[in-house]
């Protein structure tokens, strides 16, 4: 493993307590994204997270668009799929972004899911071993470009072995589709020092039926993926909670809905359970609606939760 001189305490401060997980911006033109990213920075959010899907923008190129539009806010991949680019490309791309944007890039890595991996012709049978080998290969990569400070790495980790790998080989973990109870368990596995940055989906709507319908449309995709259902089983949920987009109890546990104070209370629950940073993902019909929800939450002092 190469020398990693990353000051994790300083990284946590730069990330801030609350960030934004980008759920709809990726479908918009770059010009819209640039304006949105600049506004989110002005609202006080510390980190902007971008995902990666087979039909979406490539994660590192996407991060570059957002980094170029901001001055202080960190941009993190949540996550860059290890099956999409080899370890050399990931290492060199991260170094280029780290150097070009004053250390504001965080490389979140993940193993994705079996159906998405097999569709690309890869074998998903041993994801933890695959991630370990990928990190080994990144560490062995030579880079001739201008050297930035080491780029922080986080793993999309849910359960014990991947959380252990996150704690020992990277700066921490970015769990997705989780509850504050999971955050407490993850902190216990990671120990006190690594970054723990869970995602929290939110619906800014006080009508229970409508809010849960919105949440179920989102949850139905993830409840079809074994990585997430196996993690939920570890937390005490079972198959009856997974049908038809989730039981009311599971919907309420995964998706925080209601008025701004109710949503902020859920963010605080993660922080109280051991999170260093919570990335909030508002569910909305359009990117414009998503931005408006974040404006409302920022005016309610979410960023200082």
Image (cartoon, rainbow, N blue to C red):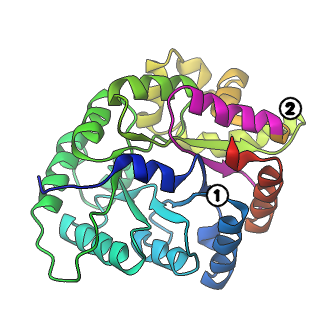
3 lies left or right of 113: left
Question: What residue span does the magenta drawing correspond to?
Answer: 261-285
Q: Quadrant of residue 177?
A: top right
198 lies left or right of 10: right
Q: Residue at x 40, y 72 (%)?
A: 60
Circle 1 packing at 10 Å, graded few (<14), some (14-19), many (20+), is: many
Q: Which comes sooner in the sequence, label 1 or label 2? A: 1
Q: In which quadrant will I find the C terminus?
A: top right
- The dot on residue 220 is none
Q: Quadrant of residue 261?
A: top right
61 over 235 or under it: above or below? below
Distance between the alpha carbons at the discs numbered 1 and 2: 28 Å
Circle 2 packing at 10 Å, graded few (<14), some (14-19), many (20+), is: few
Q: Marks 1 and 2: which is nearer the front?
A: 1
251 lies left or right of 17: right
Q: Residue at x 54, y 25 (%)?
A: 273
Say which residue label 2 marks: 208
Q: Residue at x 73, y 66 (%)?
A: 287
- Pick whichever, 155 or 8, lies toward us: 8
Q: Residue at x 30, y 74 (%)?
A: 93
Q: Is residue 109 something one can see in this rendering?
A: yes
Image coords of residue 150 (percent x, y): 27, 63
At mark 1, the secondary structure is: loop
Say which residue label 1 marks: 45
- Pick whichever, 287 or 240, lies toward us: 287
19 over 98 or under it: above or below? above
83 lies left or right of 222: left
Residue 267 in the magenta stretch? The answer is: yes
At mark 2, the secondary structure is: helix
Image coords of residue 167 (percent x, y): 28, 37
- Pick whichever, 203 or 65, lies toward us: 65
Residue 24 in the magenta stretch? The answer is: no
């Amino acid at each position: 493993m190469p020398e990693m001189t990353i000051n994790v305490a300083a990284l946590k401060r730069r990330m801030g307590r609350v960030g934004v997980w980008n759920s709809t911006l990726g479908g918009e033109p770059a010009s819209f994204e640039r304006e949105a990213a600049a506004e989110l920075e002005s609202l006080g959010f510390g980190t902007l997270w971008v995902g990666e899907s087979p039909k979406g923008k490539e994660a590192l190129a996407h991060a570059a668009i957002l980094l170029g539009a901001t001055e202080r806010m960190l941009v993190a991949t949540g996550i860059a799929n290890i099956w999409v680019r080899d370890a050399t490309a990931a290492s060199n791309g991260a170094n280029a972004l780290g150097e070009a944007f004053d250390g504001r890039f965080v490389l979140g890595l993940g193993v994705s899911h079996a159906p998405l991996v097999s569709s690309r012709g890869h074998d998903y049978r041993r994801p933890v071993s695959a991630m370990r080998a990928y990190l080994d290969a990144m560490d062995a990569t030579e880079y001739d470009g201008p050297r930035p400070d080491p780029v922080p790495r986080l793993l999309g980790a849910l359960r014990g072995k991947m959380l252990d790998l996150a704690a020992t080989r990277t700066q921490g973990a970015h769990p997705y589709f989780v509850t504050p109870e999971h955050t407490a368990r993850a902190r216990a596995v990671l120990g006190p020092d690594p970054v723990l940055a869970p995602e929290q989906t939110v619906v800014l709507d006080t009508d229970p039926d409508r809010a849960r319908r919105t949440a179920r449309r989102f949850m139905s995709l993830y409840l079809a993926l074994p990585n997430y259902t196996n993690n939920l089983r570890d937390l005490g949920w079972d198959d009856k909670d997974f049908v038809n987009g989730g039981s009311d109890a599971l919907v309420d546990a995964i998706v925080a809905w209601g008025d701004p104070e109710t949503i902020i209370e859920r963010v605080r629950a993660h922080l109280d359970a051991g999170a260093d940073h919570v990335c909030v993902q508002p569910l909305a019909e359009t990117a414009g609606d998503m931005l408006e929800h974040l404006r409302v939450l920022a005016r309610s002092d979410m960023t200082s939760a």
